[in-house]
Image (spheres, helix red, strand yellow):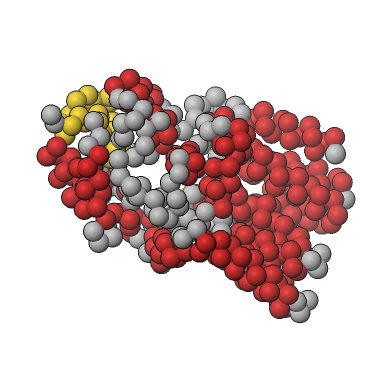
Amino acid sequence: MLFLVIASAVQVFILSNVQFTPWPEMLLWPWLINQGWVPFTDLILAHTPLLYLSLSLWYRLVGPGLIALKIFTWIYILITATALWIITIKQSGKKSAAISLLLYFMMQTIYQGNGVWFDLALAPMSLLIYYFLTSQRVGMAGILFSVSFFIKQTSFWLIFPIIWQLLTTRSVQRFLTAAVVTSVIILSMFALIGILDDFYLWTIRVGVFSLSRSQWQSQWPTLSQAIVFLFLPFVVSVFDYKLAPWIIFASLGVFPRWELFHFQPALPFLVLGLVQISIKNRKFFSVLLVLISLLYFRVLIRDWGKPDRFFDPDTLQAVQFIQAQTKPSDNLYVFNYWDHIYFLSNRLPATRPYVPSFPVFLNISGIQLEMVKDLEANRPPFVVYHPLEKSGYGSYNPRPLWDYLNKDYQVYQKISDQLWILKRNE
């Protein structure tokens, strides 16, 4: 236990000194919920809600802000690490548990885990589902699988290793009963507060069937990225066929939009597999450990002392301008830029419902016209504006919004080539 405490303290120290990723959504969405905005009705969101609802409760407890988000992130990481430590002790002993802890901390950093996103939240859930299944506590596994889906829809892929595991124990019915009952309870709560239909529309019809197929959502790795970061999952899967389904299906969140942090749910299984390699083939494990260490120290050298993402000087200057030039009762519109500016400037969006600046949402019939009506009614004095880019998300031109801004606003200040302040015409 002393080793766990010391290693965890060292990891928190390291994470506090490498670049942190405070995803704008993890600041804005919980803050708006605490302002009385209802998910899926006042907030158009394609993600299932348990993570940002948890964050909203956390912000109510400790206060919203960057420090609170960092602490929340590191608590989540340590929960996964502690669960991995306990499970490895039961499976392989204390020495292997120490190895698992060090491996997890290194790989968690390599795979962009210093920032809470839905995949990070799935890591302890997927690990505990596996543990409860292997220890014959099938009902608990069913409950956690249901809860995982309401954290992020990609947890659905875990059903395949789960069924594979259950077929050997003939406990499918107990698992499904627990999962279905838990889901019915959660969905009944959504129905009671009147968001069930909107939940289905945005998280299933749009989030699952539209967003994942959008051309804007597709981002594939380069050949070198694929070789480097798929090597370990491939090797461990080949070495340990029992863990292979868990590694493969827990990694599927990385497609079609390749980002390393999408591997977070698979990392505990990679670590468990590496521990088995360390027991059965020490020489091969030593080679893998050298490779992991090289990647780890490369990340540390690259990211040590770097400022937090999305808190660049341009963003902070725009926030200072809005706070100085508007009243707290004024609202704001952010066009084609990071939307945590609403939170940082403590100004509510001028459009309700809040709609993310992604084509899959803005292309829904009539939604831009409704946003224009809100802008005409609320008349925000300023707009934080990012010029259209040549490619990617930032290149999409929402024509009705674009036309309205060109007609009713003019450039007031250029903070940089990438960030302007528009002022409403008198």
Of residue 402 and residue 159, the one placed in the foreground of this image is: 402
- Whether residue 374 is situated above or below residue 157 in the rendered picture: above
Determine the residue positioned at 33% across, 57% down: 360
Of residue 235 and residue 132, the one placed in the foreground of this image is: 132
Q: Is residue 281 left or right of residue 217?
A: right
Quadrant of the drawing holding the C terminus: top left
Q: Is residue 335 left or right of residue 220?
A: left
Determine the residue positioned at 60% across, 27% down: 17
Q: Which image quadrant for residue 361?
A: bottom left
Most extreme residue toward the top, as rendered?
A: 324
Residue 25 visible to an observer of this rendering? no
Determine the residue positioned at 27% across, 56% down: 367
- Whether residue 119 is situated above or below residue 308 in the rendered picture: below
Residue 145 visible to an observer of this rendering? yes
Determine the residue positioned at 50% across, 64% down: 191
Q: Where is residue 105 drawn, in percent x and y?
A: 68, 41
Q: Where is residue 221 drawn, in percent x and y?
A: 45, 52
Q: Where is residue 258 drawn, in percent x and y?
A: 46, 53
Q: Which image quadrant for residue 382?
A: top left
Q: Which image quadrant for residue 336?
A: top left
- Whether residue 259 is situated above or below residue 198 in the rendered picture: above
